[in-house]
Structures are given as structure tokens and as C-alpha cells.
Amino acid sequence: MTINLLLSRLISALLVIFGVICLVFLLLHMVPGDPVEVMLGESARPADRAALRLALGLDRPILEQLFSYLNGLLHFDLGQSLHSRQPITELLMQRLPATLELTGAALAIAVITALPLGVMAALYQGKKQDSGAMLFSLLGISIPNFWLGPMLILLFSLWLGWTPVSGRDAPGALILPAITLGTALAAILARMVRSTLLEVLHEDYIRTAQAKGLARSQVIWRHALGNAWLPIITLLGLQLGALLDGAVITETIFDWPGLGSLLVESIQKRDYPAVQGCVLLISVTYVVVNMLTDLLYSWVDPRIRIGET
């Protein structure tokens, strides 16, 4: 991998992030609603509104506010929350661990569930096991988070009393949000594992491994899956961004104190700097994960050289 390739990827990532920043900034200021009115209420006097708008810098033209925000980013300054007056960086760092915990648990559930299902579906193609695994995949893709989450709360929290309804502090509070967030990824990943395994199970090296007397489990998990990881890694890299998107809904449903719930709260309050900070962090994470996925290709399969693709 050459330095020029890394630089080109980095420049492309920076351009994407810059476009997202500008687009979100302009769209936020086009959304109906005034943060000053939200903070002071409709009964506030015009003089008080004008004074607060001046103090917050909202009286300046939109482009001037945008340039000021971009200049702050160059100095790693995300600004302050319009409501709490807390630095956005501190606000994000307070919420980030909860989102990382939820995303990591959801990803673990997805992988642990999808790999056995996908392998079973490929080994028993056309049989009941295959049909059952693909039915799970269909349901997982079809059921949205905003329906699955409340149903899990109704069943396991209210009826059975096994898990907390919401929050992060109680034991077992992570279980239902992680299942809600990881189900869709598990369904998609199971289908990908099945299709990639079906492509390699009839290759010559698989028949050679079987002819040498290797155990079936070793043939499948070492030789077959070992050569089927590339499309699976691609899917995981792309879907990690989808996990962050889905976390917005899941965190809101379960009152999980992460970036997703902070984003929703900030939108409701018209807290522009907080919304921009959340979107910026999610965008940077998504771009970095995709770059790391590209770099991981050459490690998984040394025959691949990203600079030649």
C-alpha cells in the first residue's frame, strides 16, 4: 500500500466529512423553530429574545455562523451547548462510552448469532435447517427497531420482569437494547455467510481437505470460512455505520444515555452545536471504519493489494 493511496483515501474522507458538516449546518438552520423561543418560551419579551440571540451569536448571517463554526473545528473547538453552556466535546465524551458499549454488544450478538446460522444454512441447503435460518433472516430484516424494542420491553420487562424497562444502571439493562440493535445485522450477516460458504464449499481445495481426512468442523471453520471472510468483512464495515444510525432509535426507546438519545434531545431543543457535534462524531466514525475495512483486506488475504484494485 503506497503513501499516495493513503493520502487519497484521507483526502476523500475529509471531503465527505466537510460536506456532511456543511449540509447538516444549513439544514438545521432551515428547520422551523427558534432555539431562543424554545429556551425562553413563547411569553418572553422581544427584548429578552433579542438579547439572548445576540449572546448566542444567532443574530449573525448563516454563512458567517458557518465560517465561524468551521474555524472553530480547525482549532478542535466544537463550541458550547446552547442550553447547558457545556463544551460540546465534554458532552460527547460523557455520552460516547454508552454508545460504544451498546454498539459493541449488538455487534457481538450479531456475529455470535449469524455465523452458526449461516454455516448451518449452507451445510443443509434446501432442508429444514436452511429454511429456518432464512426465515429468521427474513424476520430480522423486516422487523423495524421501533417495533421490536417495545415488544421486547412488553414481554421481558413488563410481563416476565426479567430485565429493566430502560436506563443503563440496572443489571441486565444492556440485554434488550443490544438484541434490538443487533437483530437486523445478524439477519443480514447470516445470509451473507450462507451465500459465501455456498460459493467455496465446492472448490477444489475444500475437496482436497476432505480427502486428507480432516474433520468436517475443521474444513468448514478453517478452510471454507477462512477464504470467505472478505465479503463478510465488507458487510460488517458497512453495517457498523448502520448500527450507529439504528442506535438513535434504540437509545431513544430504552432511554439509553448515548449519542443517539443526545442527538434526539438536541434536535428537540434546537441545540445546533450539540446536533452538529453528534453528527460529526458519527460521520467520522463511519468514515474511519470504512477506511480500516479497506486496510483489513490485505491482512486477511495477502494476495490482495489495495493499491492494485
Image (tube, rainbow, N blue to C red):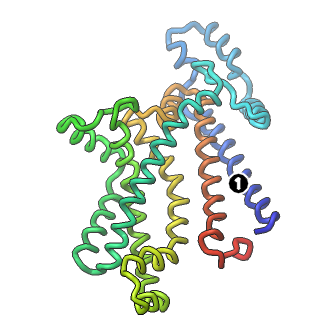
Give the left or right position of residue 146, taking residue 204 as reference. Answer: left
What residue appears at the point 45 percent right and 53 percent down from the top-left corner? 107
Based on the displayed image, in which of its 4 quarters is residue 211 positioned? bottom left
| Residue 280, placed above or below residue 274 | below
Q: Position of residue 305 (x, y in %)?
A: 70, 74
Based on the displayed image, in which of its 4 quarters is residue 112 positioned? bottom left
Q: Position of residue 25 (x, y in %)?
A: 65, 37
Helix, strand or loop status at disc 1: helix
| Residue 162, placed above or below residue 185 | above
| Residue 43, placed above or below residue 153 | above
Quadrant placement of the N terminus: bottom right
Give the left or right position of residue 127, taking residue 179 as reference. Answer: left
What residue appears at the point 62 percent right and 8 percent down from the top-left corner? 48
Give the left or right position of residue 216, taking residue 203 as reference. Answer: left
What residue appears at the point 74 percent right and 72 percent down from the top-left corner? 307
Which residue is most to the right?
Answer: 4
What residue appears at the point 62 percent right and 19 percent down from the top-left corner? 85
Q: Position of residue 214 (x, y in %)?
A: 41, 84
The amino acid pointed to by label 1 is Ala
- Count neighbours of disc 1 (C-alpha within 10 A) and say few if under 14, some if 14 to 19, many if 20 or more: some
Which residue is most to the left?
Answer: 159
Report which residue position mark 1 lands on: 13
Q: Position of residue 218 (x, y in %)?
A: 41, 77
Based on the displayed image, in which of its 4 quarters is residue 146 positioned? top left
